[in-house]
Image (cartoon, rainbow, N blue to C red):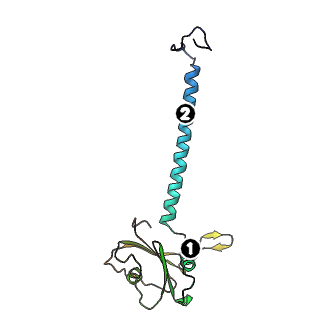
Amino acid sequence: MNLRNPSLKVNEAPAVGPGQSAGVVHIQSRQVLGSLGILIVKAFVALLLIAFAFRLLASPESYKGERGWVEHENPTNSVPPAERVFVHANTDTFILHYRTNLTVREVIDASKLKDHLVQVTIFRKSAPTGYPVGEGEVMTQRQVFSEAVQPTNSPAFAVEPEDAFLIFTGPHNVF
């Protein structure tokens, strides 16, 4: 016996005529649509978070961010500030002493990644972009080189003092 409609048996469905809807079916469809909507929103938020994470991995902040991180990790380095080359290679950071004709290959070879295919991005303090990054602050640093480099390649690029290198293994040609 159905408590809402005593004339119906438990397994009987109510008769639905034109323009009428079955209350139970209608309530269940709302619950399904509501659950589906929540799943869609959760999936969308998850995709946004994943896209944001890839964006962070794919494009480091700037010269200022890379240099700052390397300096932070190497506080006792004795190389004069104007002669430093900052290197962030996967999880390692170090500072090289700049010398005339220093090559990208020599910087890579100074890291633990010298025998691997690597993505090399070089940020330079003097490469202006001219877009604002904060109140009254304009970013004046940006990448000047980005290339996948084989263990046997030596890119023809002039390294300058205070360049900041980001060297990593993984997806290549992402910049």
Residue 126 numbered mark, or none: none
Number of residues whose C-alpha sits closer than 10 Å to that of mark 1, classed few (under 14), some (14–19) or many (20 or more) = some
- Determine whether 51 is above or below 147 in the image: above
- Residue shown at 55%/44% (left/top)? 41
Residue 138 location, quadrant = bottom right
* Label 2 residue SS: helix
Which residue does the numbered mark 2 point to in the structure image?
A: 33
- Residue shown at 68%/72% (left/top)? 136
- Residue shown at 38%/72% (left/top)? 118
Q: Picture coordinates of residue 170 (x, y %)? A: 40, 66
- Determine whether 171 is above or below 88 in the image: above
Q: Picture coordinates of residue 121 (x, y %)? A: 45, 74
Q: Picture coordinates of residue 22 (x, y %)? A: 56, 19
Residue type (three-letter) at the residue carrying disc 1: Gly
Res. 108 in view: yes
- Determine whether 96 is above or below 68 in the image: below
Task: Farthest residue to the top: give it.
Answer: 7
* Label 1 residue SS: helix
Nearer to the camera, 115 or 159: 115
Name the N-terminal-most of marks 2 and 1.
2
Residue 145 location, quadrant = bottom left
- Residue shown at 49%/81% (left/top)? 94
Which residue does the numbered mark 1 point to in the structure image?
A: 65
**Rendered-image quadrant of the N terminus:** top right
Nearer to the camera, 7 or 48: 7
Task: Farthest residue to the left: give it.
Answer: 152
**Rendered-image quadrant of the C terminus:** bottom left
Q: Picture coordinates of residue 38 (x, y %)? A: 56, 40
Res. 164 in view: no
- Determine whether 3 is above or below 99 in the image: above
Residue 16 location, quadrant = top right
Residue type (three-letter) at the residue carrying disc 2: Leu
